Amino acid sequence: MTTTGRRALLAAGAAAGATALVGCTSSGGEGPRRPSAAEREAERAARAEAALRARSVAVARGLLERYDAVLAAHPALAPRLTPLRRSVAAHVEALGEGGTGAVEPAVASPASSASPTPSASARPTTASPAPVPVAPDPGTALGELAAAERTASDGHADALLAAPPEYARLLASVAASGAVHAYLLTEGARA
């Protein structure tokens, strides 16, 4: 083969390789690939589920804050409220798929409601809109806590319609637990 033939062959091979490379990377000038209808629907469903989870966790966290406020205002109720509060803390964890972080137990002591201790003030806090008001009477405070449990339970039950199946089962369980808590805070005490 002559030098001219080799050069021609190399040039032809390089041109063919470049053509093949351009053909693989070019999309015909249409710009970036557009997602398919199925991909758009999956993304929409994922965003809706994330928003539903965020709302459900917010409801459960609000209820947990109410338990903490009642325990701080009425430490004598701790034996009765601590197991229910623990259950609500577990709901916060479960509703957020465990990604919400550990929930600190409430510290119920007369000193904690009067002035913060150094260890309590050193703990990282999350921004909360305002402290939860608690009735001065323990019976009234329990009634308000039961009403908050019913409201949270109703909110979780309402969210069932928009939830995917697995999360709907979890919401149903949390809603049922809230209804039981409300009963135990009111009627269950009389039995």
Image: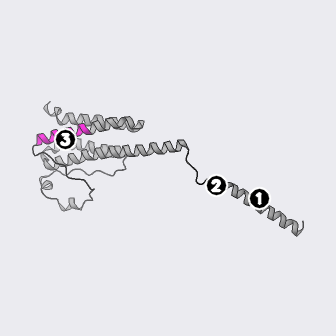
Q: Which residue is painted at 23% across and 48% down in the image?
A: 65
Earlier-in-chain disc, 3 versus 2: 2
**Circle 2: residue type:** Gly
Residue 120 horizontal side relative to residue 10, left or right: left
**Circle 3: residue type:** Leu
> Relative to the observer, which residue lies in front, 91 or 28?
28
Q: Position of residue 69 (x, y in %)?
A: 18, 49
> Which residue appears farthest toward the left when viewing the image?
137
Between label 3 and label 1, give the one nearer the viewer: 1
Q: Which residue is painted at 38% across and 34% down in the image?
A: 161
Q: Which residues are magenta?
A: 138-151
Q: Secondary structure at mark 3?
A: helix
Q: Are marks 2 and 1 in contact (CB under 8 Å)?
A: no
Location of residue 137 (image quadrant): top left
> Which residue appears farthest toward the top when viewing the image?
191
Residue highlighted by disc 3:
145
Residue highlighted by disc 1:
16
Image disc number at residue 122: none
Residue 15 horizontal side relative to residue 163, left or right: right
Q: Looking at the rendering, in which quadrant would you find the N terminus? A: bottom right
Mark 3 to mark 1 CA distance (whole Å): 77 Å
Tell me which colouring the rendered structure shows. Answer: one colour
Residue highlighted by disc 2:
29
Mark 3 to mark 2 CA distance (whole Å): 62 Å
Q: Is residue 30 magenta?
A: no
